[in-house]
Every structure is written in C-alpha cells, then in structure tokens.
Amino acid sequence: MERQMEPLGSLTLRNAPPPDSFITVGGVRIGIKTTLKYLGIVLDSRWDFGPHLRALTPKLVRTAGALSQLLPNLGGPNITCRKLYTGIVRSMALYGAPIWGNNLTVRKAALLQKPQRALAVRVIRGYRTISGEAATLLAQTLPWKYEARVLAQLYTWRQVQARGGDLSLKEQREQLRRAVLTDWLHSLGSPTAGHELIAAIRPVFWDWLERRHGVFSYRLTQVLTGHGCFGKYLCRIGRELTGGCHHCANPEDDAKHTLLDCPAWANDRRDLVANLDGQALSLPAIISAMVGRESAWLAVATYCETVMSAKEAAEREREVTTDNPSRRRRLVRRRQNDLRPP
C-alpha cells in the first residue's frame, strides 16, 4: 500500500526566489515561495512573522465584529460573558506567540490592537470612538503585544529551566507579567488619546487592575471617557452645531462640566458628594474612590445613570423638534438602533 506524499511547500531564505523555481522530492515537484503556512503559522523568508500577523488580523477583526453584535451597550450579556468572548479572540491572536512574540515591531503590534480595542470597547459598553489605550485600561485587559512577549519569554525560560533553575513556572510567569505591566504603565505616561482619563487612573494603576468590584454601564462609561451625550462630543462628530450645554449657559458641555459644574444636576451632585464622604469632586479623586470602595463605585454609577438618562432624553426631544434636516433623517435609524452599540 502506497501513500502519496502531500508536500507543504518549500521556503527560500532569500528576498525572493528565482522565477518558476522548484525542488523535487520523491518525484514530486515542489514550488519555492517566500512564505509557507505550517501548523497554522505563516513562516516567511525573513523570519519576522509579519506575513503571519497580516494574514491573521482580518480573521481577528471579523470574529471580533461578529461577537460585538452579541454585546449591545444597553442590556445584553454581563461582564463575565463579555470577557469570555474577548478571551476567544485573544486565544486566536496569540496562537504561536511563544515563537513570534519577541519579534513584534510597533507596526506589527498595531495589527493586534485593532481587534482587541473593538472587544475592549464592548466590555466597558462604550462608544467605538474610544481609544484603544483607554478601552483596554478600563477593561483591565493587558494589551496583547505584552501578552505575546510574556509567552515568548516564558517559552525561552522553560528551555533554560530544563537544565535546572530555582523558580517555579507560576513564579516565573508572575515575574514576567509584573515586568510587562510595569512597561505598560510607563507607556501610559504618553498616551495618544484619552489623556485625562488615563492620567487619573495611572496613580492607582495597580489597584485598578487588581480590583474585584465594579462593572461598567453604558452611561458610566460615557462620563469617564467623555464619549457620549455631551455637546462637545456631539459637535465633534457632526451631531450638534455647537459644543455648548443645553442645560445651562456654559459654552462647552463635556464630561467634566457634567460631572463637576453644571447647575442642572446640583441636587444629584450633592448626593454624590455625600456618598463620597464629602470628598471634593475631580476625575482623579473619583477614580481613586471608586477603586477603594464598592459603595463609591455604585454612587458614581448612580449619578451617571440619572444624569445621562436625562441628557439623552433631552437630546431625543431636540431631534424631534429640530429644523435641521440632517438630524431628522437620522431619527428613525437611531430609534431602531437604540439597543445596539453606537
């Protein structure tokens, strides 16, 4: 009984193989290429795994997009399920990371960030305009580029450990993870977006990642990120003509104004301050209180739910009565999509 050989292909280590080049093995003609897929990983002649990540990213984006349809911002699965779905795509993304994790350049790391950001936004029930840095930090999700580095370094360590060593696998993994978390904290010192929020979380970075209480609601995330029913944000995305506050005379309506200053919410703000033991309101102080006590988290979430619900109701009323044709045309679609991610 004979079994016909099914060659995978052959790989050249030159920049490009000669035209129509091939080798013959066992009477079978095998073409020479610059890439070769083996066990799910695309190997390339430069051994930098760029082709692998470029081929993988569209699959990750499609999967993340499909799962995102199951994760509306209002209602839908709880935080445990949302993190489970994130873990599915994470496992796909980090397949083979012990081999390629040490070869990530800035450009290749950016390929992993796109699907991770999409899912992190769903974990925190936020707008899709939230930056990847802010979304992953809020979701307590270590960027995958750092996770890949841990897996690669752990693989190298296990090869060395076979010749004898002092640390256990668990201890080494924790040590490597602590190191990349420190690198992440350092990189958050100069974020590309979400500066105020990230600056507020950095002083309590370790406590934020280790906390076991507090879940995000659609309206809490709006206030923390500034992406939501605020005049400044709506003006930026073309939904309002100006960024002024419709509830007072302030010329700039943003999350900070809503949280700290707007007189329309003075009574709700007074209750919030009382629940925070009279602490002066500022974003860093609020973040610190939320991390420290579950009761503080619930107090802030309640304030955001009450105030943002009122702002959203007022916005819907303006959409009905506006003379602006562009806003009226979007009214039906907006109502149909109320329970879908924005």
Image (spheres, rainbow, N blue to C red):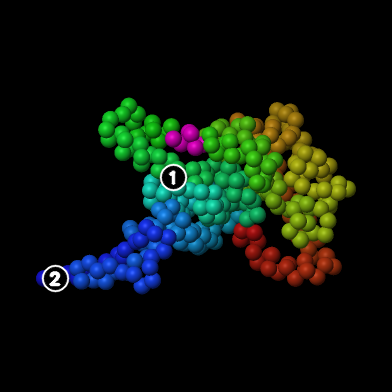
Q: Quadrant of the N terminus?
A: bottom left
Q: Quadrant of the C terminus?
A: bottom right
Task: State the residue lying farthest toward the left.
Answer: 1
Vertical placement of residue 291 versus 335, above or below: above
Residue 301 seen in the current view: no
Along the horizontal axis of the image, is 158 left or right of 65? left
Disc 1 residue type? Asn
In the rendered image, residue 242 lying in the magenta stretch gets the answer: no
Q: Residues within 10 Å of mark 2 (few under 14, many from 20)?
A: few
**Which numbered dot is residue 87?**
none
Disc 2 residue type? Glu
The residue located at (59%, 49%) in the rendering is 132
Number of callouts in the render?
2
The residue located at (32%, 27%) in the rendering is 166
Q: Nearer the viewer, residue 159 or 12?
A: 12
Task: State the residue lying farthest toward the front.
Answer: 18
Compare marks 1 and 2 and give the one earlier in the sequence.
2
Q: Residue 210: horizontal and vertical position, in percent? A: 52, 34
Q: Which residue is mark 1?
A: 102
Q: Residue 99: horizontal and vertical position, in percent? A: 38, 48
Label 2 SS? loop
Residue 337 seen in the current view: yes
Along the horizontal axis of the image, is 30 left or right of 303? left
Label 1 SS? helix
Q: Nearer the viewer, residue 12 or 105?
A: 12
Q: Which residues are magenta?
A: 176-181
The residue located at (76%, 56%) in the rendering is 236
Majority SS type along the magenta span: helix
Vertical placement of residue 41 versus 250, above or below: below
**Which numbered dot is residue 2?**
2
